[in-house]
Image (spheres, rainbow, N blue to C red):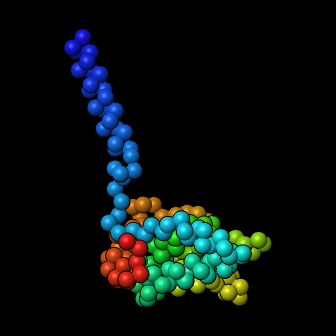
Amino acid sequence: MKKFIIFLFMVLVVFLVMAFSMSCEAIEKPQYYNQPDSFLVSYMSTFPDTETKIIKALNIIDIMYPNWQDNYKYGIFDCSEMTEFVWYFFNKCGIESTYCQSNTLWHCWLEVKDNNKNIIIETTTLSIVSEENAGWYYSGRDVKYNRHMRIDEIDWWNSKIFNGSLLSSDLRYR
């Protein structure tokens, strides 16, 4: 009987350790990261059209991270990292977007579908691409959709630029 109680106790300990390791508290998070609250989705829902929502979201990023464009560094915080960040932020705002990548152009951007048109977001400048210039983004003929970077390829939340320059703003989320 004593051995059975010890066995049950050990099973309970193993179960508790497993349960804790699967809980949200056990997940290692980046030291600095933005957690826009659900108010962003509510705020964005007050605007009737998708393009206005996009403009408002880009304005928020511009306020949170002044000099966004100046922080571009190839291979460190470049178009792929910027696109992943804006995609993440758009999701927090309730804006569905598609990650686009062209190996011919060596460039990444976002695309948002709005009724019968595609709105292209140039994430390095936080701007909407005009219809006249939209053709350039598809000139590579090898555009891949929703081919996000692997977690080992991207880490905008850990980059020196993001943690240094961008988070130096007093407007950052804490």
Residue at 57% in and 77% down: 57
Q: Residue furthest top?
A: 1
Rendered-image quadrant of the N terminus: top left
Q: Is residue 132 left or right of residue 35?
A: right
Closer to us: 37 or 87: 37
- Can residue 18 be seen from the camera position used here? yes
x, y (%) of residue 33?
39, 68
**Is residue 141 among what the camera can see?**
no
Nearest the eye: 87 or 151: 87
Q: Quadrant of residue 137?
A: bottom right
Query: Please, is residue 168 above or below residue 40 in the view?
Result: below
**Left or right: 118, with 42 as reference point:** right
Q: State which quarter of the image contains the C terminus.
A: bottom left
x and y, in percent, of residue 22 in the image: 38, 44
Horizontal relation, residue 122 to residue 165: left or right: right
Q: Residue at x 40, y 84 (%)?
A: 71
